[in-house]
Amino acid sequence: MTDLNKELGVENSALAKVIEETMAKFFKEADDKSEARSNRLEKRIESMHSILCRHTDEIKTLRADTNMLQERITQTNKPQKSLEAKITEMEDRSRRDNLLIFNLKEGTEGPNARAYLMESFPKWFPALGAAPLEIMRAHRLGPPRRSTASADTGHSHRPRPLILKCLRYTERDLLLKEARKHAPEVAGIQLKFAADYSEPTTARRKSCYKIMHDARTKGFDAFLLYPATIKLQRSNESYVFKESTDAEEFLAADNRD
């Protein structure tokens, strides 16, 4: 401002003073506004930080609650799975007298499936001799199907399986053993016999079929034990797998053909 006084001269010093005051006021107002803005910004940042901290705490609480609920669900599922396994085992036991027959053309058994089977078993399995087989009942599973070719597709519908209940499971096992040795044919179609299991057990056993096929291509003798245990034998080697995934990994690691 001294330079300005020199330029304006002494006579204009009053004007210089006004300018100086005006500029000082302007800068002060600018500083005040800047400080106010800075204070507001700091308050907003503090508010956002507070909200963020609160949300962080809430997330931690929710995560802890979620972990606790997951632990409770896990603890609850343990007895539930155990109970489901027991129910499945009980159902399998109630079905152990049952035998399923597949590929028997619809209507072949006539109106009395039990009488048909009682007459057919001695013919199908002569090795059984005169041993009496006591069949409690027999019938088809599911709604009726047409056994003739479909007009739309030209393909014949697969006949419904025939299920029979033996008086004793030992008779079921005897029939199943003979059927595996000498599968009978009816009308040129080979029949297939299988034990009857609950849906969970059936699903587990189905998951083993491909693995057993792969094992046989590698030279193993493959057996499927109850409920879904795979047993593999080759030469003097013997392996038992309760989980199909374990057997699959074993075969994948086996390089011998």
Image (tube, rainbow, N blue to C red):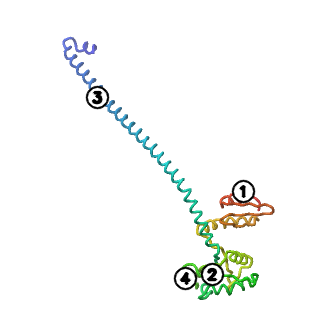
Disc 2 + disc 3, Cβ < 8 Å? no
The quarter holding residue 93 reads bottom right
Question: Badge 2, how many Cα within 10 Å: few under 14, some, many 20+?
Answer: few
Q: At label 2, which amino acid type do we have? A: Met
Mark 2 vs mark 3, foreground winner is 2
Q: Position of residue 184 (x, y in %)?
A: 71, 82
Q: Which residue is mark 3?
A: 33
Residue at mark 3 to residue at mark 1: CA–CA distance: 76 Å
Mark 4 vs mark 2, foreground winner is 2
Disc 4 + disc 2, Cβ < 8 Å? no
Q: Which residue is mark 2?
A: 136
Q: Which residue is mark 1?
A: 253
* Residue at disc 1, secondary structure: helix
Q: At label 1, which amino acid type do we have? A: Ala
Residue at mark 2 to residue at mark 1: CA–CA distance: 48 Å
Of the residues under marks 3 and 1, which one precedes in the sequence?
A: 3
Q: Position of residue 147 (x, y in %)?
A: 58, 84
The quarter holding residue 216 reads bottom right
At x 43%, y 41%, the residue is 57
Q: Residue pushed farthest top?
A: 10
Mark 1 vs mark 4, foreground winner is 4
At x 77%, y 60%, the residue is 256
Of the residues under marks 3 and 4, which one precedes in the sequence?
A: 3
Of the residues under marks 2 and 3, which one precedes in the sequence?
A: 3
Q: Position of residue 60 (x, y in %)?
A: 46, 43
Q: At label 3, which amino acid type do we have? A: Lys
Q: Is residue 98 above or below residue 213?
A: below
